[in-house]
Image (cartoon, rainbow, N blue to C red):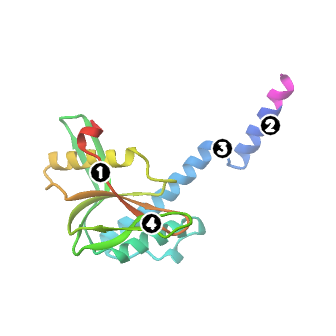
Amino acid sequence: PDAIDEQAKLIESLLTAHKLTVNHQRDKAGDRGSRVHDALETWAAMGTVPHPDDFSDEDRGYVQGLSDFLTTANIEPVAHEVMVGSSQHGYAGRFDLRARITAPSTVVGKCYPKKPPRMTTVPVGAGIFDLKTSAGVYETHPLQLEAYEAASVECGYEPTNWRAILHVTADGKYELVKSRAKFDHFL
């Protein structure tokens, strides 16, 4: 038992020294996500589509996916980093982008490793986007969007026509996953 404890401590110290612990990896992913979100925010504020070559190797693919979406969709930013809250239900949050689609846009709706992507059409109208650099789109993401929508309306914004997760990946792809959740699901 003592030898095993000593080996475990050695392994832990090596992982810490080389910044390979679970916490280091989580923080690294959070930093990457922040940089990609900054690229979206700059586009929303300035109208400049981010150029992947302006980013590190680690971020380049994610920014490529973001850039491809921004140049494919007929999208016009309305507001970014929008803070909303619901006093009725006791929560608050911040979503990445409120935008208008000015003409129907055909975009990637689902990426697959070995077959062509499934395309989807985003209709004209207002929507809420939340950018994700995670490994995938999780069950909680659409629920989060519906909570943002309800809080947004409670804060005085007009209702949107749709909500969607913009998922970008390390290999330079994107997929726009429209929410099919309902606010009741969130509650």
Disc 4 marks a residue whose amino acid type is Tyr
Q: Secondary structure at mark 1?
A: loop
Q: Secondary structure at mark 4?
A: strand
* Between marks 3 and 1 in the image, the one whose residue lies nearer the viewer: 1
Q: CA distance from mark 3 to mark 1?
A: 36 Å
Residue found at x 23% / y 75%: 103
The residue to which callout 4 is attached is 174
Q: Secondary structure at mark 3?
A: loop
Residue found at x 24% / y 42%: 183
Q: CA distance from mark 2 to mark 3?
A: 13 Å
Disc 2 marks a residue whose amino acid type is Leu
The residue to which callout 1 is attached is 180
Q: CA distance from mark 2 to mark 1?
A: 48 Å
Within-10-Å neighbours for mark 4: few <14, some 14–19, many 20+: many
Q: Secondary structure at mark 2?
A: helix
Check if residue 2 falls in the magenta segment. yes
Q: Which mark is residue 113?
A: none
Write the start and end of the magenta stretch as one range: 1-6
Disc 3 marks a residue whose amino acid type is Thr
* Between marks 4 and 1 in the image, the one whose residue lies nearer the viewer: 1
The residue to which callout 2 is attached is 10
Going from N to C along the chain, the mark reached first, 2 or 4, is 2
The residue to which callout 3 is attached is 21
Residue found at x 36% / y 73%: 70
Going from N to C along the chain, the mark reached first, 4 or 1, is 4
Q: Residue furthest right?
A: 3
Going from N to C along the chain, the mark reached first, 3 or 1, is 3
Q: CA distance from mark 2 to mark 4?
A: 40 Å
